[in-house]
Image (cartoon, coloured by chain):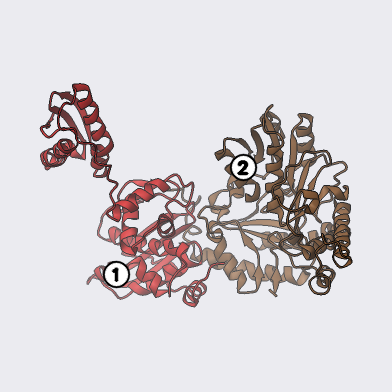
Chain colours: A red, B brown
C-alpha cells in the first residue's frame, strides 16, 4: 500500500481538467501503455502566449492521475514560458509530496508539458527526449537521466529509478546509471595515473602503452561527447590518429588533439610524444 | 475489518475455531515442548496432535510432516536439500510463473554455477509437459513446479508432472500453498518428494508452515541447532502457530467440498456479472483447471492500482498484477509469461474468495466496480484511440 497524501488522493478521486480540448493549440504525449503509464496533455494558448485552458487524459496509477491533475491546475493562466518553469519537484510539492517510488509520475507531467510546448512551437515532437536510450525497458535516455539527477539532486541509482523508471525493468542498465550518476556528481571515473616512464621505452612498449591509454581513457572520454578516436600508427614518438564521430567535424578538434590527447599521452607515456591527425 | 475481503490468496482471516484452539498456549500453557517436565510435555503432545492433523490432510505419515515458518521456508528447504543430497547433479527445472520463493532461489542458484530451466506457459497459463520431458537431463536434481498459480489460480497437472520426473529418477517438489483446502490431494498416490504449505493461506495465523518430506528421501537440514523436528529444522517450535495450523487443516478438510461448491459459485457469479457489465474484460488463465476461489480479470485500458484504490474507498480488498502496486515497475511476471497484452496486463485485478465471503460481498463489488472502470477509461487516453492500442514505444 502506498502512502499517498490526502491531496494526492483527492486529485485522484476528483481529478481536475480531465478530457480533450477539441481545438487545442497543442498536444503533448508521453509514455505508453506498455510502460504502464501515459499522459496526453492538451493546451489552449491565446495570442499572448497565455495558457487559457489545459486538459489531460492519463493511463496510470493514482499518482500519475493526480500528477496530471496537479499539472493542469498549476499551468492554467500562466504564460507558456512561466509554465515551463514548473519542475517535476513543483508538481510533487503541489501534491504534498509523492512516495519516492512514484516520483516518475511527476517527471512524466513535466515531460508532457515540454512535449506540448514543442508541438506548439512547431518543433517536431520527438517520441523521446534527446539523447541516447540508456534503459531499453522504459525508453529512458541519458539526457532525461542527467536532468532528473540535476533537478532533483539525486544521489543513488535507486533514486534514478524512482524518478525516471530507468533500471526498473531487466536491470541491465544499472551499471550505466551508476556511471551517469558518477559523471553528474563530478566524480568522473579517473583511471589511476599510469606509471610515467620518462625514458627507455622500447618501440613495442611505447605502442602498447599508447594504445592502452587511448583505449581505456581517451576514447571513452570522447565517446561521451559523441565522438571517438582511432589509433592508426605509432612511428617513433609520432602518434598518428583519426578522429571519428562528432570529433571529425568538430571545429575545436585540433584543440582536442593538442590539449587533451597529446597532453595526456605526454603525461602517461613519454613527455615528447607528438600527436598528428591523419585524414 | 474491511467491508469485503477478496484477497484470500494473499492471506486469510484466522478462523475463530483456530484462534480458540491456540489461545491457551499463549497464556497458561506456555511450556517448551522439548522440556522434560509435564508442563512442557503437554505442549509437545499438542504439537503431535497438530502433526497428525496435517498428516491426515496430506494422507501421509506424521513423521513426514515438518513444521517451519512459512511457505517460502518450505520451498527454500526442499530445493536446497534436493541439491545438497545430490552434489553431482547441477540442474533444476522449474517454471516461469513460480512464486518468488522458488523463482528467486533458482536465480540465486544460477549465480552459484547451477543451471536452471524455466518452463514456459501458453496464453492460458498452462504448461507443456513435452517441454518438461525434453528438459530432463541426467544431471537434473529436481523438478519444482507449483501446484496452482497464486495469481491466476491455474492448477498444474502435478500428478503427471511428478510421474514424468519419477520415471527419470528426478526428485519433485511442489509449492502447494494455494491448493491446501481447495484441491484434494493424496500423498499416498501423488508421487512428489516435497510439498510445501503455509498456515496463513488456510485460516491459520502467519508465521507457520509445513513441509512434507517423503520417507526415504534424503534430507539435508537448512536450519541447524537443536533437535527439534527430529533435527531436521532446529529452533524452538512456534507452538501456537503449529497448533493453529493443525486445527486449520482439520477444518479445511471438512470444507473442501464447500470450497468447490459454495465458494466456487460465488466466484463464478462475481466473474460472470463483471464480464457482463464491463466491456473489454477478459479472464487471465484457463477456466478448465482453476482454483475454485480465484479469478484474475483484466480490464483493458486502465491501470490496476487505480482500480484497487477506488475499490478501497468502498472497503473492497483485492490485488493487482499491475506494476504500480508491487514496487517493481513491470507488470506481473506471471501475466508476462502468459503473453497477456500490455493493454490488459496493467489492468489486471485478482479476486480471491474464501468461505467467509457472502452473496452480499459479491453484489457490492458487482455494483461498484463497473462505474469505477468506466470512470478510469474516461480518464485514459487509450480508450479514445481508434482501433488497436498504440504500439510500445519503449
Circle number at residue B106: 2
Q: Secondary structure at mark 2?
A: helix
Tell me what residue is drawn at x 70 percent, y 59 percent: B9
In the picture of the structure, the residue carrying the numbered disc 1 is: A83
Report the chain holding disc 2. B
Tell me, yes or no, whether dots 2 and 1 are on the same chain: no
Relative to B12, residue A268 above or below: above
Left or right of A169? Residue B271 is right
Tell me what residue is drawn at x 34 percent, y 53 percent: A181
Residue A265 in percent (x, y) is at 17, 35
Q: Quadrant of residue A70?
A: bottom left
Report how far apart the C-alphas of labels 2 and 1 lie in the structure. Answer: 50 Å
Q: Is residue B276 visible?
A: no
Q: Secondary structure at mark 1?
A: helix
Disc 1: CA contacts within 10 A as few (<14), some (14-19) or many (>=20): many
Left or right of A171? Residue B11 is right
Relative to A215, residue B239 above or below: below
Report the chain holding disc 1. A
Residue situated in front as seen by the camera: A266 or B125: A266
Q: Quadrant of residue A161?
A: bottom left
Q: Is residue B337 visible?
A: yes
Residue situated in front as seen by the camera: A49 or A270: A270
Numbered disc in front, either 2 or 1: 2
Amino acid at each position: 500500500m502506498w502512502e499517498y497524501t490526502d491531496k494526492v488522493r483527492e486529485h485522484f478521486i476528483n481529478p481536475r481538467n480531465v478530457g480533450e480540448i477539441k481545438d487545442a493549440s497543442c498536444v503533448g504525449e508521453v509514455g505508453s501503455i506498455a510502460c504502464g503509464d501515459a499522459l496526453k496533455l492538451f493546451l489552449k494558448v491565446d495570442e499572448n502566449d497565455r495558457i487559457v485552458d489545459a486538459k489531460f487524459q492519463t493511463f496510470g496509477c493514482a499518482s500519475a492521475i493526480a500528477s496530471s491533475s496537479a499539472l493542469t491546475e498549476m499551468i492554467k493562466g500562466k504564460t507558456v514560458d512561466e509554465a515551463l518553469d514548473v519542475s517535476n519537484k513543483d508538481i510533487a510539492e503541489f501534491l504534498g509530496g509523492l512516495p519516492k517510488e512514484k516520483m516518475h509520475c511527476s517527471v512524466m507531467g513535466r515531460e508532457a508539458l515540454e512535449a506540448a510546448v514543442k508541438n506548439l512551437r512547431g518543433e517536431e515532437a520527438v517520441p523521446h527526449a534527446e539523447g541516447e536510450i540508456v534503459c531499453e525497458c522504459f525508453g529512458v535516455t541519458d539526457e532525461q537521466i542527467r536532468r532528473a539527477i540535476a533537478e532533483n539532486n539525486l544521489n543513488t541509482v535507486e533514486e534514478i529509478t524512482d524518478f525516471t523508471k530507468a533500471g526498473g525493468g531487466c536491470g541491465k542498465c544499472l551499471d550505466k546509471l551508476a556511471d551517469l550518476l558518477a559523471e553528474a556528481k563530478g566524480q568522473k571515473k579517473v583511471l589511476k595515473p599510469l606509471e610515467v616512464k620518462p625514458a627507455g621505452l622500447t618501440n613495442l612498449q611505447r605502442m602498447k602503452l599508447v594504445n592502452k591509454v587511448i583505449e581505456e581513457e581517451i576514447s571513452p572520454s570522447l565517446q561521451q561527447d559523441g565522438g571517438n578516436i582511432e589509433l592508426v600508427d605509432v612511428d617513433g614518438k609520432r602518434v598518428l590518429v583519426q578522429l571519428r564521430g562528432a570529433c571529425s567535424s568538430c571545429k575545436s578538434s585540433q584543440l582536442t588533439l593538442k590539449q587533451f590527447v597529446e597532453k595526456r599521452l605526454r603525461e602517461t607515456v613519454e613527455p615528447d610524444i607528438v600527436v598528428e591527425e591523419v585524414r | 475489518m474491511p467491508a469485503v475481503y477478496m484477497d484470500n490468496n494473499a492471506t486469510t482471516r484466522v478462523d475463530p475455531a483456530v484462534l480458540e484452539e491456540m489461545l491457551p498456549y499463549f497464556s497458561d500453557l506456555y511450556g517448551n515442548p522439548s522440556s522434560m517436565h509435564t508442563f512442557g510435555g503437554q505442549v509437545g503432545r499438542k504439537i503431535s496432535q497438530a502433526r497428525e492433523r496435517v498428516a491426515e490432510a496430506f494422507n501421509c505419515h506424521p513423521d513426514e510432516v515438518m513444521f517451519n515458518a512459512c511457505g517460502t521456508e518450505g520451498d527454500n528447504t526442499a530445493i536446497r536439500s534436493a541439491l545438497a543430497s545430490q552434489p553431482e547433479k547441477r540442474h533444476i527445472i522449474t517454471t516461469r510463473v513460480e512464486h518468488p520463493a522458488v523463482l528467486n532461489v533458482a536465480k540465486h542458484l544460477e549465480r552459484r554455477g547451477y543451471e536452471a530451466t524455466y518452463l514456459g506457459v501458453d496464453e492460458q497459463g498452462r504448461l507443456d509437459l513435452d517441454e518438461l520431458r525434453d528438459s530432463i537431463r541426467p544431471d537434473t536434481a529436481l523438478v519444482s513446479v507449483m501446484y496452482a498459480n497464486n495469481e491466476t489460480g491455474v492448477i498444474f497437472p502435478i500428478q503427471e508432472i511428478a510421474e514424468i520426473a519419477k520415471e527419470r529418477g528426478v526428485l519433485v517438489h511442489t509449492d502447494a500453498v494455494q491448493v491446501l483446502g481447495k484441491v484434494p490431494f493424496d500423498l499416498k498416490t501423488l508421487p512428489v518428494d516435497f510439498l510445501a504449505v503455509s498456515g496463513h493461506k488456510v485460516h491459520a495465523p502467519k508465521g507457520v508452515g509445513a513441509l512434507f518430506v517423503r520417507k526415504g528421501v534424503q534430507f539435508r537440514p537448512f536450519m541447524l541447532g537443536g533437535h527439534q523436528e527430529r533435527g531436521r529444522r532446529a529452533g524452538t517450535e512456534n507452538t501456537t502457530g503449529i497448533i493453529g495450523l493443525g486445527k486449520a487443516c482439520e477444518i479445511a478438510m471438512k470444507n473442501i467440498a464447500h470450497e468447490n461448491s459454495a465458494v466456487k459459485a460465488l466466484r463464478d457469479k462475481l466473474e460472470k456479472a463483471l464480464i457482463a457489465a464491463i466491456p473489454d474484460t477478459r479472464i487471465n488463465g484457463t477456466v478448465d483447471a482453476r482454483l475454485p476461489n480465484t479469478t484474475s480479470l483484466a480490464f483493458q485500458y486502465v491501470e490496476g492500482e487505480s482500480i484497487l484504490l477506488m475499490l478501497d474507498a468502498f472497503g473492497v480488498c483485492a490485488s493487482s498484477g499491475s506494476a504500480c502496486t508491487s514496487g517493481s515497475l513491470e507488470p506481473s511476471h506471471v501475466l508476462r509469461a502468459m503473453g497477456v497484452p500490455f493493454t490488459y496486463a496493467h489492468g489486471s485485478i485478482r479476486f480471491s474468495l474464501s468461505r467467509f465471503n457472502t452473496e452480499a460481498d459479491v453484489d457490492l463489488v458487482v455494483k461498484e466496480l463497473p462505474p469505477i472502470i468506466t470512470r478510469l477509461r474516461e480518464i485514459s487516453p487509450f480508450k479514445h484511440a481508434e482501433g488497436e492500442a498504440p504500439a510500445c514505444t519503449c
